Amino acid sequence: MALAVARLLFLQLVLGPTLVVDIRLQTAVENFRNSHIDYPRANYPMGFQGYCNGMMAYVRGREQRWYCPNIHYMIHAPWRAIRKFCKYSESFCDNYNEYCTLTQDTFPLTICSLVKQPPTSCHYNGTLTNQRLYLLCSRKYDAEPIGIIGFS
């Protein structure tokens, strides 16, 4: 019995931090996928007054944000097409303390920009463009995207 308890304590000490980090990364990947990938591109009813107002209502609700983000990017491409660029990342972005990469391909991207923030709601304008993306990756090898830091 004492040996079993000792093994359990050992595993908690050794694997505990690893499990926490892995769960945090999986959450970041899931949040990125749900908040930045919209493929095929959704259509919102007229009442939303445009794509970005509908999408940002969804994003703010999903992330449980009360404030209006100034800018938000939505990629209109399949997850696997975006994901492949983080499979091998040589670059480390010191400002973000994460590995990062620039996609070789361009992707359809909607840039949602905050126009005004009245007390009860946010109002956004959208710009649809094709751009190469600067992505944050979850690690150096066999990684997945966890953020967009820009485009070119």
Image (cartoon, rainbow, N blue to C red):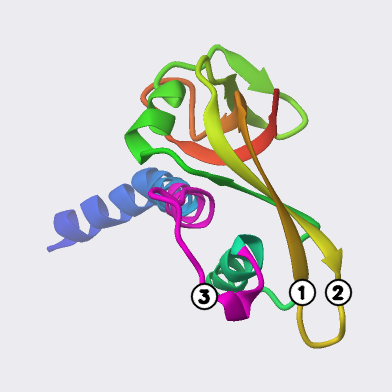
Residue 141 falls left or right of residue 28: left
Mark 1 secondary-structure assignment:
loop
Q: Which residue is mark 2?
A: 117
Q: What span is in magenta?
A: 29-50
- Residue 84: x and y, percent? 38, 24
Q: Which residue is mark 3?
A: 45
Q: Amino acid at mark 3?
A: Pro
User: For the point 51% across and 69% down, which residue is it?
Assistant: 44
Q: Residues within 10 Å of mark 2 (few under 14, many from 20)?
A: some
Mark 2 secondary-structure assignment:
loop
- Residue 127: x and y, percent? 70, 46
Label 3 to label 2: alpha-carbon separation: 21 Å
CB contact under 8 Å: marks 1 and 2: yes
Of residues 81 and 92, the one nearer the viewer is 81
- Residue 116: x and y, percent? 87, 70
Q: Is residue 132 above or below residue 30?
A: above
User: Which labelled disc corresponds to residue 82?
Assistant: none
